Amino acid sequence: MIVTRESGTGRLPYPAEPEPRSLLRRRMPQRRYYRLAWPPWQPPSMDGLAAIVTPDASTGWADGLLARDADGLVVWAATGPEPEAQGMARLQYPGVRAITFAPAKGDPRRVRLGLELALNLAAGRTDGDVSAPAILTSWSMPTPPTGVVRIPHLISIQRDGMVIDRVVWELATTAAAERWLDGPLPNLAFFEPHLEKLLRLRAAARRAQLPVTAVQLGLAELLRDQDLSIRIVYQHAELFRELLLANCR
């Protein structure tokens, strides 16, 4: 996790977005900052998952209802010894829009953020009239079942006048991950040990303070006014491999 103050005054360099009225409302696929905000519900104090489902969805598989509004329901279900496999299976349930893990005695703010990120990721993957796919996220590094990969999304959280850059994970089938990337996946195992360096690059790019090596390799031109995302890293895997290895020398 990388924490930075974005200006000498302690203010954020961009206007903070107003808090949405409902977590369930559709969001834009891109968002510069998230908030670690308390939800109006509390998951049970045992390992489980939280999910957002449509108002008419069957919830017989869930163990509890956390919230209800006109847009849908937030439900909770206990998980057993293989939570990742259970979460992936529930993505296929009718009406499920987003899932995130809710570990025992975990921070409800992280659960809320995990659901919000899942909605944002799904909103960016709509295809014409086809509804957005359900997304599974995890605050901690998950263990993928067979045929599933973990994607370390780089996100920025606004907190107390600071910007906190960190990783939140997504679990997706290999086929779904390749559709998201618009091509074959790179060597994911190479990048995972370098996530802290990627977070530092993300923060440096936001402050227009990229290291000389990154500028020489064309990272500033590649990003322009974008945040560094893991999708950009994977789409330009050779460039980032060279950059990360150069920083290790």
Image (tube, helix red, strand yellow):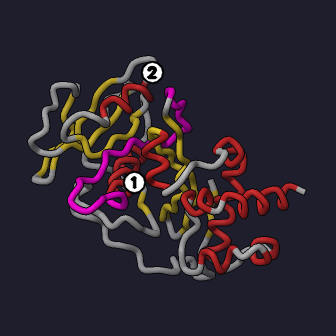
The amino acid sitting under disc 1 is Leu
Residue identified by numbered label 1? 117
Q: Main secondary structure of the magenta part?
A: loop
Q: Is residue 19 left or right of residue 247?
A: left
Query: Looking at the image, which residue sits at the far front?
Result: 183
* Vertical relation: 29 (above or below) 85: below
Q: In percent of the image, x 45 and y 21: which residue is there? A: 82
Of the numbered discs in the image, which one, if any, rests on residue 55?
none
Earlier-in-chain disc, 2 versus 1: 2
Query: Dot 1 surroundings within 10 Å: few (below 14), some, or many (20 or more)?
Result: many
Residue identified by numbered label 2? 82
Q: Quadrant of the C terminus?
A: bottom right
The amino acid sitting under disc 2 is Glu
- Helix, strand, or loop for circle 2? loop
* Magenta stretch, residue numbers: 123-146
> Within the magenta stretch, is there residue 189?
no
- Helix, strand, or loop for circle 1? helix
Return the residue nearer the eye: 173 or 8: 173
Q: In percent of the image, x 41 and y 67: which residue is there? A: 30
